[in-house]
Amino acid sequence: MADIREDLKSILLEIAEDVEPNNVNYDSNFITDLSLDSMILLEFGSELESKYDIQIPEEEYPNMATINQTAELIKKLQVK
Amino acid sequence: MEKRKVVITGIGAISPLGLSMEETWANLIDGKNGVKELERFASEEYRAHKAGEVYGFDINNFINDKNLKNIGLCSQFGVAAAKMALDNANLKLTDTDRIGVVIGTTMGDVQELEKVDEDYFYKGIDAINPKSMLNYPANEIAKNIASVFGFYGPNNTFTTACAAGNYAYGYAYDCIQDGTADIMVAGGADVLSRVAFAGFNRLFAVAPDVCQPFCLDRKGMMVSEGAAFLIMESEESAKKRGTKILAEFLGYALSCDAFDITIPHEEGKGAIAVMSSAIKNAGIKTTDINYINTHGTGTKENDRVESLAIKEVFKEHSIKLSISSTKSMLGHLMGASSAIEGAICVKVLQENIIPPTINFTTPDPDCDLDIVPNIAKKKQVDFVMSNAFAFGGNNACIIMKKWEE
Amino acid sequence: MKNKIVITKTGAISPIGVGVENFISNIQKINNPQDIKTFDTEKYDIKKAFVANDFDPKPILGDKGLRNFNRNTLFILSAIKKDMDNEINYFKTEDKRLGLTIGTCFGSLQSISDYELDIFDKGPRKINPMGFGNTVLNSPTSRANIWFGLTSQSTTVSTGSISSAKAIEFSIGQINKNVVDAMICGGAEELNMQTFLGYYLNKFLTKNEEITCYEKNSTGTIISEGCGLALLETYENAVKRGAKILASILGYGTSFYGSIDNTKNFSTKGVVNSIKNALKNGNIDTKDIDLVISSANGLTPFDSMEENSLMEVFGDRLTEIPVIPLKSLIGETIGASGLFSIVAASNIKDIKELPFVYKYSNGQKKLIKVNNFKINYSNFTKILVNCISECGNHSAIILQIEK
């Protein structure tokens, strides 16, 4: 499977308009490093759901705290 | 100049716990849950499947006029609840120029819009009933109530989401106090909508099974529907009519979080401001309040922030207060929620019984107040406060007092 | 009136101009409706309306943070930013209580429908969670409170075509109660497919490119959009802070006289009562009024209700009072219409000549259109802004124009 992390980063930056692109690496924590709130993450999740044709269950949200984790989660959900 | 006293002389309600205020009240102090499996529309595709619906409602059981079947269901709830409040206040409809109507609603007769949307999506424009399009503006409810009873005084509609009922009470209070009207039919109405049910589900804000306000295990709110009205009147007018006075409306306040559209301010800035101003406007002290009917939606954030704000405003008195969330039983009636909670407060003042917060299992250290868990409690209550903290950070708080001659 | 309440600033985003200056300059000429671009009009035989096609929020508000906002929200934010920015800064710096009240009839209507259609289309689990915030009617107002940090209060009033007049009423009440020092009071409405459909299917819209008011053979109205604003505060407050006073509110009146069937709501009783209440409220005689900005929109029964009511209230005096049906110049802005009338009235001194006014003919017992009517607009001092609605709810506001 192709590396989707760069795509995830650009989707995130489109939603989180206040985040400085240079501050985002694949292991930045969305909440502690980038100060994103739950609504932004919900919107991010919703974008991923349409783009990757997946359904992210509520209990998985804590498991998408970084771009690396999100990429893993998408991989897992796509396999299902 | 001495301000006119504003009193409450009638209450009426339609709720998931009954087709009258008496029935609703009896069920509330019994700790009954009005939230059940959703019947109005198919919910398989949704995340959660429960809601608070009004069962067995027929407008013609309240007013036998076939024309009333042509108005929206939300308007019908409103007309029925207003009718019961008017009967309760023994109001003879004579000098109706001085009687006004004000309501709060989130989306008004939205089921009329749902019909339009369904026809548009599945059948095309030609299938749309143009009449439905005239029925859905939010002001239809107040218009229909005023038209049915012939009230020619001020007519207004607040669409300040879940705080709209309290906005309506505040406006009615002002109209009576400044002499624009002698009597106001004030309250709120909302009907269960697919949009609200879907939206709250999508925000993961709906509890899967039960609504557990202020409980550590709480998982969210419940979407619900209904209507409630108070007859608010100048003391002078009530005495002239010789009707029984149920309670006194002391004052209200508004504030705005100006923080987020769906999340309350994390430190309860707006909630603290609105409660403090309401106490000031009512001309009382924090220690006078015996009971708060909370906004208490059962979501993690609301209940944490509301508890924090109560503790900040009431300081050491906060442990002497009783608070409860009747949303644990009724669900969240949206624009009608603060309206029915205001009506409940009138009953609390009259009966000295506090309805419980049901579905309580485990205490939450963040919400360490007397939430009257699971079982109603007898308590002398002389002053009540009712909170409403809506979407958009629109906050409204009202204060009422036991009536004494 | 308890306190003397004044208007110290106005604002406008409208199809005929962005900003008050443009709005006032453009109501002085005939503006034609434009092609609707916000939704597909292929299926309808009416394709034009007064649409703010040139409106772009980005130069006013910046690029960031706008992506989840609906059009109504963008109108309100832009109108406030464009015309009230200095005032907001002043009230914030001085730690004064500044509230916000918006009147809107349809508010977030299209956002509700879009959300519904999305549920049908994608299923309830795949809808955009951010869209839900827009479905609540108070979201445009609340987003403005958030954007500008206005914590005193946020109020949304929805009373059909008189929504913004009711917003004025509410603002007066809140200032009189001294719970705010000033109120940004607005009316806002977006032109969207749902509103258009409602008017179209009920045959309220004309195929012509102009609205002819007070005419038996008029074929309907033209729908419009935008946001009008007025900053209200007490006279003392305004003087103390050295603000320029445009107008003061002399009187306010309201009355309801309706039926559940809107086709029966054309009695003059409610309109007459509302105007009389305003006159009484301000202790003003009919002979003091020298201009009427009216509500007529080209829908015949609606227009005759207003025409007959004005005749009933003013009698022969009406021959001396020019009547301006503002909607014939800017279109039917529904919930925003009252506020646009207030904006026009407050800035009347800046008007040199309107394309036409209506004058009452005693002989014909009707209001007659007079083109290029020569009059000095800066002489008008007491203006009646008449706001009527199709649901039997009416309001009247009397303004005193400050010298």
Image (spheres, coloured by chain):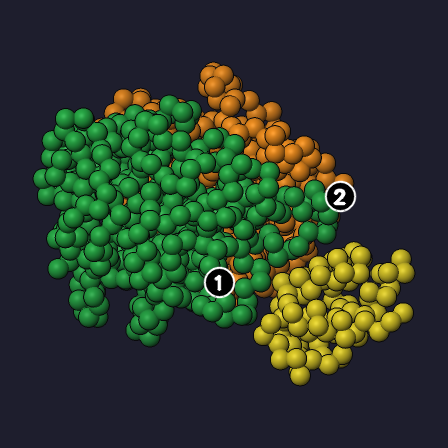
Chain colours: A yellow, B orange, C green
Residue C268, picture quadrant: top left
Give the image location of residue B371, x and y in percent. 55, 52
Give the image location of residue C52, x and y in percent. 45, 54
Mark 1 highlights which residue?
C56
Front tag of 1 and 2: 1
Mark 2 highlights which residue?
B45
Q: Chain of mark 2?
A: B
Q: Secondary structure at mark 2?
A: loop
Residue C220, picture quadrant: top left
Judging depth in this view, the residue of C34 and B255 nearest the camera is C34
Picture layout, residue C163 above or below residue B313:
above
Picture layout, residue B12 above or below residue C47:
above
Residue sitting at x 46%, y 16%:
B65
Q: Residue furthest bottom?
A: A22
Residue sitting at x 63%, y 50%:
B200
Q: Is residue C182 visible?
A: no
Residue sitting at x 31%, y 35%:
C213
Distance (Cα) linking label 1 and label 2: 39 Å
Q: Are marks 1 and 2 on the same chain?
A: no
Q: Amino acid at mark 1?
A: Asp
How many other residues sit within 10 Å of disc 1, few (<14), some (14-19) or many (≥20)? few
